[in-house]
Amino acid sequence: MAESRTHAERLAARDGWFAPESVIRRVGNSPLTPFLGGGPAVLLQVAHPLVAAGLYVGGLYAWHVPAMYDAALLDERIHVVEHLWFLGSALLFWSCVIDPEPFHATVPHAGRIFYLVLVGAAQNLLGALLSFSSRVLYAYAGQPERYGITTLDDQRVGRAIMGAPGSIIFLIAVSAAFFTWLAEEEREQLRREGRA
């Protein structure tokens, strides 16, 4: 008997991306559970792919608001909090797309490509805003020129130093997600044909 559901419906049913019980099952044993008091229910809310992406991208933008960035430049304690935010939100974000233990990806294989491209684009938009700014945005604006470059050029070079590796990481991740998805689809096809 032929199945009447679309391919997308079969993927959604198989992967259960938005099904709460599926997400609890996948992330309930996450290495982050002990740190998020309340167990799987809290983890379900925080580790949901849309929340994790929002915390990651939102934090990235928030920490680049001039007042926040300057505060981190001028106070070492705030700087530590900033980097703890980056680490924590990055762990949540990447845990949604990484399969090997101790993580349990909550985004299905096909959805990972879209998820990564969307977040990578948001990250690159921030980089573009910094790169093409016509004025220095942060506290070091009053600093004297060093190494023969202006503070505006320094801001742009700093963005390039931070942005290039991040873009490469996202490109590698999207490529890996694509090939993992293809392999999963091939295994699924072989299973349907009774050859696996």
Image (cartoon, grey):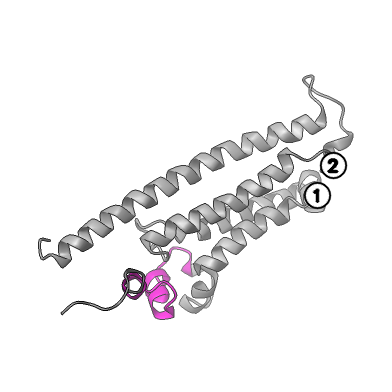
Report x, y in % for residue 166: 55, 42
Residue 10 in sight = yes
Report x, y in % for residue 156: 72, 34
**Residue at image location 38% in from the left, 52% down from the top:** 177
Relative to residue 180, is residue 137 drawn left or right?
right
Could you tell me what secondary structure mostly forms the magenta stretch?
A: helix
Q: Is residue 23 magenta?
A: yes
Q: Is residue 94 magenta?
A: no
Q: Secondary structure at mark 1?
A: helix
**Residue at image location 45% in from the left, 61% down from the top:** 96
Q: Residue 187 is drawn in which quadrant?
A: bottom left
Tell me which label, 1 or 2, sits earlier in the chain.
1
In the image, 43 versus 132, the foreground residue is: 132
User: Mark 1 and mark 2: span between their CA atoms?
Assistant: 8 Å
Vertical position of residue 37 compared to residue 117: above or below:
below
Residue pointed to by mark 2: 139
Report x, y in % for residue 25: 37, 74
- Which corner quadrant holds the N terminus? bottom left
- The stretch in magenta equals 10-33
Q: Residue furthest top?
A: 148
Q: Are marks 1 and 2 in contact (CB under 8 Å)?
A: yes
Residue pointed to by mark 1: 66
Relative to residue 90, is residue 130 drawn left or right?
right
Q: Residue furthest left?
A: 195
**Residue at image location 44% in from the left, 63% down from the top:** 31
- Which corner quadrant holds the C terminus? bottom left
